[in-house]
Amino acid sequence: MKTIHVVEQTLPMAWEKAVVHCWEQGVRIPTQYDKPGDPASRDVTVMIHITDPLAEPRIHRAFPGGLADLEKYRAEVLYQAAKERPLSLYSIGFWGSLIDWEGNRWFV
């Protein structure tokens, strides 16, 4: 499989460039997602280098799932909004080690 290296200032620019390179240079390969008669999908290994990761915009306008899913993602990152989910290995980890079990106090 072909490997490409994408270098861009922001994540959205790099993601878009990686998609274009995948389309243009990717290996055509059938996947489990293809329906009968669909053309083969394209695949490539990509290493993405973001030179200014905090530069705006940080999220591409074509975010999968739309704005509703983006808001859920933002809330989980900022507020650990998954409190309504039962405790799982996903919720323990870096953020779980900083917040007490009630979720309302930071350890110092």
Image (cartoon, helix red, strand yellow):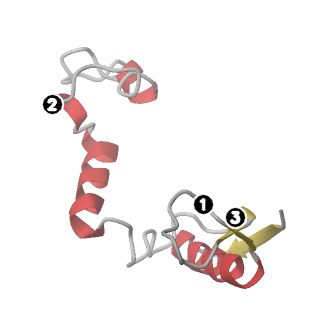
Callout 3 secondary element: strand
For marks 2 and 3 on the same chain, the one whose residue lies earlier in the sequence = 3
Q: On the image, which quarter does residue 96 sit in? A: top left
The residue at 71%/80% (across/down) is: 21
- Of labels 2 and 1, earlier in sequence is 1
Q: CA distance from mark 2 to mark 1?
A: 35 Å
Q: Is residue 83 left or right of residue 87?
A: left
Q: Residue at x 65, y 74 (%)?
A: 18
Report the residue marked by disc 3.
Answer: 48
- Residue type, mark 3 in image: Ile
Q: Residues within 10 Å of mark 3 (few under 14, many from 20)?
A: some
Q: Residue at x 80, y 69 (%)?
A: 4
User: In the picture, which quadrant includes the C terminus?
Assistant: top left
Which residue lies under the disc numbered 2?
84
Question: Residue 31, labelled with which disc?
Answer: 1
Q: Is residue 64 left or right of residue 75?
A: right
**Residue 60's x, y, as percent?**
44, 75
**Percent position (x, y) of residue 31?**
60, 60
Q: Which tag, 1 or 3, sits closer to the chain's start?
A: 1
